[in-house]
Image (spheres, grey):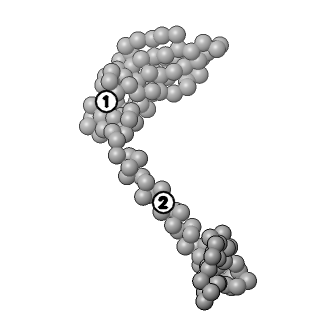
Amino acid sequence: MRCPPATPETCLPPSRHIQDLFNAASLGTEAVMKRISTLLAVLAVLPALAAPQAYAGSGGEQGELRRERRAGNILPPREIERDILPRMAGMQYLGPEYDPAAMTYRLKFIKNGRVTFIDVDARTGRIIGQSR
């Protein structure tokens, strides 16, 4: 890198400028702390700037589930679990999945290494199928 003869100190390699940003000996500890605080604040804001793009889509299954719940079209998963779990005594409950196209919950259970799925109508809470 060639520097103009009048300003050699401003013509440093880029890595040297970065080092100077955090050089406590030449800046003083207070100045370095302010720069670190500013850097951390900028880094904290970056995810928020990207968030609108990340959520610009339909929200997937979870977004669909929330919309249907708010509209009162389907029952909450906890209400369905409250009805179904007592019927599945002796089985370990692994959790629900929501299918927005069919408007069903699929509750997953396991016992002795065998997985059982219980399909439930999300609108009524009625069991509509069982598979292993």
Using a 10 Å C-alpha cutoff, classify the residue at mark 1 as few (fewer than 14 neighbours), some (14 to 19) or many (20 or more). Answer: many
Q: Earlier in the sequence, mark 1 or mark 2?
A: 2
**x and y, in percent, of residue 35 in the image:** 59, 76
Q: Nearer the viewer, residue 37 or 19?
A: 19
Task: Look at the picture and state if 96 lies above or below 5.
Answer: above
For the point 33% across and 21% down, the residue is 102
Report the front residue among 53 and 118. 53
Label 2 Cα neighbours within 10 Å, binned few <14 / some 14-19 / many ≥20: few
Instruction: List x then y, in percent, for residue 56.
Output: 34, 46
Instruction: Name the residue beneath numbered marker 1.
Output: 74
Q: Is residue 66 visible?
A: no
Q: Is residue 122 left or right of residue 9?
A: left
Task: Kindly identify the amino acid type of the residue bearing the numbered disc 1.
Answer: Ile
Rendered residue at 27%/31% (across/down):
73
Q: Nearer the viewer, residue 18 or 81?
A: 18
The residue that mark 2 highlights is: 46
Q: Position of residue 78 (x, y in %)?
A: 43, 32
Q: In the image, 108: left or right of 119?
A: right
- Left or right of residue 64, residue 111 in this image: right
Mark 2: secondary structure: helix
Q: Nearer the viewer, residue 107 or 50?
A: 50
> In the rendered image, which quarter is residue 89 located in?
top right
